Image (spheres, rainbow, N blue to C red):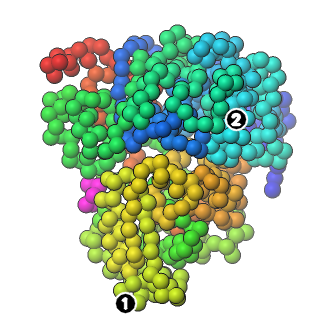
Amino acid sequence: MKKTVAPLVAILLMLGTGATAEPKTSYGLSPFGDLKYGPDFNHFDYVNPDAPKGGTIKLRDLDSFDTVNPFLLKGNPAVVNGDKGGDLYFNFTQLMTPSYDEPVAVYGLLAKSVTLDDQGQWVEFTLRPEARFHDDSPITAEDVAFTFNALKEKGHPRYGLLYRDIIAATVLDPQKIRFEFRKGALTRDLPYQVAVMPILSKASFETRDFAVTTMEPLLGSGPYELARVSPGRSITYERVKNHWAENLPVHRGRFNFDVIQVDYYRDRTIALEAFFAGEYDFREEFTSRSWATEYESKPAVKQGFIKQDVLEDAKLTGLQAFFMNSRRPPFDNIKAREAFGLLFDYEWTNRNLFYGLYDRLGSVFENSDMRATGLPSPAELDLLTPYKDLLPDAVFTEEFTPSRTDGSGNIRTQIRSALELFKQAGWTVQGKKLVNAAGQQMKVEFLLYEQSFTRVINPYVANLKRAGIDASVRVIDSASWQNRVREFDFDIVVRRFPQPQVPGVEQRDWWGSSSADVTGGLNIAGIQNPAVDALIEKIIEAQSRSELVTAARALDRVLMWNYYFIPQWYKSSHFIAYWDKFGRPASQKPGFDRAVLQSWWYDQTKAEELATRRGN
């Protein structure tokens, strides 16, 4: 394997040619060197730099929460911006902040500059001396080092996996810190991973334990402060007035609401009715039936109080799927896993349950050029051929496409094919039951924490029963579901993994052998495949976009043809609805984020007009 260097800073593109270079300093990072904004940019294009500050926006989430410490495996953390554990950037400062109209680029926030070793063995960040926590104490390199060590050693296992090749955080002076990388590690993504790390206060943990769940807010430093917590019911963030970063180009025009409140509902139907009643202001609709049938007849929609919109999304979609636990039978057999895929009638489901609003997922990297299409290219074959004896022949001879039906609900052909695959896996039909050599009927359970999803799974369960399988659905509370998934105590679960625009070290956590048995890890399918491991490393070490695409397509083929999961559906857009009291930038939504809390604002005039029209 050739030696890998990691040119992340835009001005280090010369490293791709093998030229020798001194460490260089920049204001931004991008995996392959492309930065949209120059060093003197004034604000991001997708914001209104003159947007007014003020007002409240109320959001909703389902389920509940039992902690406001989002950094641990334990507990069910609170949510803001639709992100489990919260969009950490609202409460915690990062060294650098993303731009949402670029695939992957970050610009200096806490760090006013970043310096990368010409051999990719370390990265240094120089901090802004004016940066402050919410108690007005300064943010120093000691806090950054403390955060890194706490997350890696005591935090959720995902941090240990992300940071495993970062061997030290060394404080050089109060405003400068160096992260050193393991010699020989694939380091392209590591500067980015630490750049977006949420920074915690070292001093605040002198009197409290980092590794415990809590309802006492952690000391933050972001544009919002967690001001009020109503356990299990709501969380309220308040904008920090005169925030230290408010006038930086990366913040200008952003974070305009004075208050962000998130209310929790345990029932999806009740939550929707609460929205129509004006109990909260904004929602993204994820239920196709609701979007298609439950809005237009409501008085608030008819009278124009509530607006609906579809925001196009350029992001790599990621994967939503039925994940089968390959650690246990029958899913430890590839033929059985393939058979389960045949018995899922997506076409009928989309037509009858989703009103045709979705497309079928057929890739781990859907909605991008990293999706594998056609036959493997010569460059892909170079990566795949060394593992030919370990891979299904179809990886080399066919394009993967999920099984298709005519949508009528008649899947007798699929059942016959599935039964033949089950037979090859050691299961046969006896007396209308699919049994193994010991005469035991195949039994599988779908584990859910949302009752509403049963309407999607029940038709699938019926198909499995037609094939002689004792299939069932079990709905449990969210905390119990989390615990069972963490311990890999399930047959089939539904999960979604949102892919970053430049896949990297997170792939180890999702598909790598090293994470298959890590409690709380995200390799929930239990994948342990040398070809997968090797291709993940090829993704991480890619030094150009073309190398990345080649490696991703090869990995895509291996994952899909091994049937570790049954891909579900996707849409490359956001269905949003909101009460008409907000202002939005004249520019288009950025391609890679919904950006509502990032760029909208409370429009006082609209809000007053709305109140008058409603008779409030």
> Residue 150, how many percent across, how many down?
70, 35
Which is nearer the eye, 112 or 175? 175
Q: Quadrant of the N terminus?
A: bottom right
Which residue has dot 1 on it?
431
Which residue has dot 2 on it?
150
Q: Quadrant of the C terminus?
A: top left
Q: Residues within 10 Å of mark 1 (few under 14, many from 20)?
A: few
The structure residue drawn at horizontal position 50% and vertical position 15%, both measured from the top left corner, is 240
Q: Which residues are magenta?
A: 350-355
The structure residue drawn at horizontal position 31% and vertical position 62%, both measured from the top left corner, is 349
> Residue 526, how many percent across, how many down?
60, 62
Location of residue 267 with respect to 81 vertically, above or below: below
* Dot 2: element: helix
Q: Is residue 456 magenta?
A: no
Which is nearer the eye, 350 or 145? 145
Regarding residue 129, the answer to whether it shows in the image is yes
Amino acid on which disc 1 is placed: Gly
Regarding residue 424, the answer to whether it shows in the image is no
The structure residue drawn at horizontal position 62% and vertical position 30%, both measured from the top left corner, is 198
The structure residue drawn at horizontal position 66% and vertical position 66%, both measured from the top left corner, is 529
Picture quarter containing residue 170? top right
Which is nearer the eye, 112 or 615? 615
Amino acid on which disc 2 is placed: Ala
* Dot 1: element: loop
Q: Which mark is residue 95?
A: none
Closer to the chain start, of discs 2 and 1, is 2
